[in-house]
Amino acid sequence: MTTWPTVSWAASEQRDGVSRDLPGAATATAARRGVTTGNVTVDGHRRSRLARREAADVAVVSRRALHQESRDLSDALDLLPGLHVVRVGGHGAATHVQVRGATAAQTLVALGDIPLRSPTGRPVDLEAIPVLALGSIEVWRSRGPASLGDTPIGGVIRLRPRKTGPGAEARAGYGSYGATLVEARGAWGQRHGDGGSASARWLTGDGDFPYLHDAGTPLDPSDDYLRRRGNNRVRRLSGLLRQRLHLGRRWRVGLTWLGGWRSQGLPGLAVAEATRANAETHHHNVILRGSNNRAGHATEVWAHAATEQLNVQDRLGELGPVQARTQDVRAGELGVRWRLGRGAIRPRAALAARLGGIRTDDQLTGRASPQATQAAATLSLGADLRGERWRVSPTVRATGIGSRRYEDQGWVAHWTTVDAPTRALLSGELGGAVHLTPRWVARVGLGLANRAPTLVELFGNDGTVRPAPRLRDERALTATCASELRLGRDTRGGTLAISGFLSDRTDLIQLVRAGPGQAIHTNVGHATVVGAEVATTGQWGDHLFAQASWAVLRGRDQSADPAYDGNALPLRPASRWHGAVALRRLRVATHVHAGLRVATRWQAGSFADRANLVVIPARAEVDASADLTAGHWRASLRLDNAFDAARFDRVGLPLPGRVWMLNLAWRMAESS
């Protein structure tokens, strides 16, 4: 795990009525301000408690990186080794994250300890989360926190909300191609008592950036010309509301609402852009939690209700068959967790049940079909074994899943059902950590993970995707190892973190062509993925910081089809490198400080298709930013891709070149 403290935690002693800092005090003070050390960020003692509690490979994005150095969550996650952010448009467009070569469907996103998932299998829209509402992001690579009750193949992206406390802040920005951002947060109550917070985020972008069009002849560059992306406007509004209450001396109750709205054009592939197609999405999540801590053990009960509505309009058939559809998704989940908080052996248990459903309405025919539901229950048992210098954390999970599709035959209320086979899934992980020296820790892990097919994969969409109710579950057996070394002392030092993994993945699900305008999900075989990540940071004094990371990934298709056997897995760059140097808190005048940051990143080429015929070239980018802080105000200017390198993550979906953004932020008080 890479979240053990990378600074020496200071204490103070008092002699003769005078308080003196013990060795390491300067570094501890910096840590409480959110100093980044490698892919580890120590945000006060909460990071230290996380490190003592878990034995896993975890990377953390700090609040500083979120609020000051990033425009959105995907921008911050793209800096971590082992992660690859796939973008399909400009500012505000949808993105998804791949962790260690796993797809977005194989990666779980959680808000605190509550999983955010959809029966459709659509990835969580990270751009819809208000950035100011979060205190940090934890990325659990190749496994997940024991409290979640899930064993994902890729890992878990855990969004940590900020602590409540009185305060307010806001920021506004404007940038290239009509990019506009307005975000605000207010908090009330006491930090450790009753209180709450409200955050809102408004984002727009025209997305009319220029790109090099190949005129439909990708092998002949002589006829390429510049063209502006059209029908690419995005508008978003999202919010996060939290309230916490104490009931008596033992119980704490929390209520959370996360919701948003998005309207965007659907430009399609650059070779044949759509001019009128568009989509609109509404989503709401309500979470109710109650926890009781008493006499060394803790109990938590929670409920999560989610709704989502997707409206796609393509009445001209610019993206394929003519369609005007509305899809409604409903999901609910109940769970209870228990753990013992004392002793060398600390058992824990969790039980959760969920129910989800999909209804699709065709606005052209007025037909409502198909409807599908899925029910699941998961039991998780584990324990944390702790010694003076070691930790061991075994967990076993059992899940049962049933899926059914309802369809009206002939529009006469004659309903028929199609059942997918009931599934019983077993998964688990074993993690361990040992302190070889006070500054050197090693970790190992072994995990068996699986992913059941989603409702769309099982039953199709009653249009271009055919049903496949006999799909098998995806499975993965993954072994990991990691080591972290702390170097130097006080404000002169750094960290070196090295990790590696080997994963064997079978029965992978992929959408394949099944005929003219038709596709079907199929278990295409299995693949082996092996990789390594290296991250290092350094700090020299109170002003100079540096960090660098390098990741290699080798994923090979090992299916029975000789046309693909041995090929590289698509959309997975074999190597990625990132480095940054920052000067912070340079005094310009009284109460006025400046900062500078220069970063570079490089990404190896990859393939866009399973046959390895379409190449996505390698690319290198240079980013720069400058900021000025005066009292409660902070202004910053950011320039990405300074040399205007052409880039795209998927063939036919270009990305903007050089972009800039000017931000102005205000903070009334520290409210985290």
Image (cartoon, helix red, strand yellow):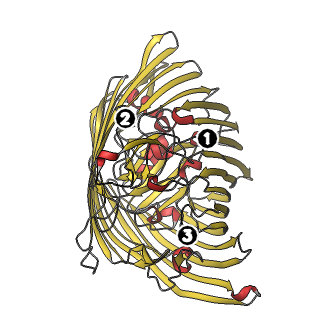
Q: Name the disc covering residue 203, or none.
A: 1
Outermost residue toward the top? 589
Residue 137 is left or right of residue 433, and the answer is right
Query: For mark 2, does the 10 Å Cα neighbourhood hold few (<14), some (14 to 19), or many (20 or more) residues?
Result: some
Q: Amino acid at mark 2?
A: Asp
Residue type at mark 1: give it: Leu
Q: Quadrant of residue 430?
A: bottom left
Q: Is 275 placed above or below 477 here?
A: above
Question: Which one is in front in this view, the residue at disc 3 or the one at disc 1?
Answer: 1
Q: Which residue is tagged 3?
A: 350
Asked which secondary structure carries label 3, the reply is: strand
Mark 2 or mark 3: name the one nearer the start of the chain. 3
Residue 407 visible in the picture: yes
* Amino acid type, label 3: Ala
- The residue where tag 2 is placed is 644
Question: Viewer-nearest of labels 1 and 2?
Answer: 2
Q: Viewed as shown, does residue 494 lie left or right of 137?
A: left
Secondary element under disc 1, as helix, strand or loop, is strand
Residue at 74 percent across and 74 percent down: it is 366
Q: Position of residue 655 (x, y in %)?
A: 43, 45
Outermost residue on the front side: it is 223
Considering only order in the chain, which callout, 1 or 3, is on the residue closer to the N terminus? 1
Which quadrant of the figure has residue 286? bottom right
